[in-house]
Image (spheres, helix red, strand yellow):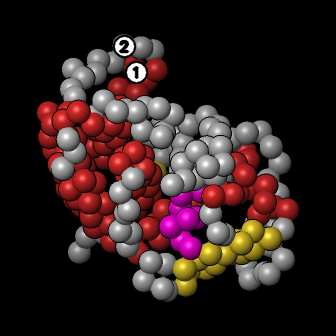
Amino acid sequence: MGLQQVDDLREEGEALYGLLTALPADAWERPTPFKGRTVNWVVQHLHDADRWAVHSVTDPEGFRRWAAERARGGAAAPEPLAGKPLLDRWRSYFDDLCSALDAADPALRAPWFGPDMGIRMMATARQMETWAHGQDIYDLLQVTRTNTDRVRNICHIGVRTMGWTFVNRKLPVPSPAPHVRLTAPSGTVWTWNDASEDHLIEGDAVEFAHVVTQGRNITDTHLTVNGEPATEWMAIAQCFAGPPETPPEPGQRSW
């Protein structure tokens, strides 16, 4: 039986592919609200990471050698594409990634650019990136997205990376970790951490996912945020790897 996280990743990719297949040819070079980067840039970014993830899952030691070579500036990259050819190549590698994750030993620790990841976390991380950058394109087109309860994976990785958000900025991690209580698209309520009304983040799960992926400023949501640790966290939340990034300014990504 396949992992639920891989099934969720596959569905996330299918949803984004459906949006992109309907994209007018002249839209691929339009700047998205994500730092003004174009649709072509966004899809190329997703494609690159999916290609690396396939390599990591199917040949961990080869990936480690390739990553070391890349860090030295010696690893070649495929010729850049744009528009539909890029979409086709991204879709092909995305399908390969889902198949590789399905076939992998669930106990495998796949190497990455930060710590190694289990297969479930690798699938969740790729879903998070696909969902978050997909939102860049929804925001550009101002198309309302239909979310499902698979967004729970993104909320979960958001909660798990609270401490890392601060460590990544060389800041002390505030305590206690806030109670997180979110309402899913289906109406189900999800919770994390010890119950507390004084240290609490509560509200819509999709809005929380937007904040931790830095797709929205916290002030552009209706989330309830109680307590200093929760307030500090939501101001800089970052659930993705890499150097510290700054959330969008208030109103920059909302419409």
Label 2, secondary structure: give it.
Answer: loop
**Which residues make up the magenta segment?**
204-211
Q: Are marks 2 and 1 in contact (CB under 8 Å)?
A: yes
Tell me the residue that label 1 is attached to: 70
Could you tell me the amino acid type at mark 2? Gly
Q: Residue at x 51, y 34 (%)?
A: 35
Q: With 238 as the anchor, is 98 left or right in this view?
A: left
Residue 24: percent from left, percent from top: 20, 41
Locate residue 137, reporting x and y percent. Answer: 36, 46
At label 1, which amino acid type do we have? Arg
Give the CA separation, mark 2 to mark 1: 5 Å
229 above or below 235? below
220 is within the stretch colored magenta: no
How many neighbours does mark 2 have within 10 angstroms: few (below 14), some (14-19), or many (20 or more)? Answer: few
- Determine the image quadrant of residue 181: bottom right
Q: Residues within 10 Å of mark 1 (few under 14, many from 20)?
A: few
Residue 235, percent from left and from top: 72, 52
* Helix, strand or loop status at disc 1: helix
Residue at figure coordinates x 83%, y 48% from the top left: 172
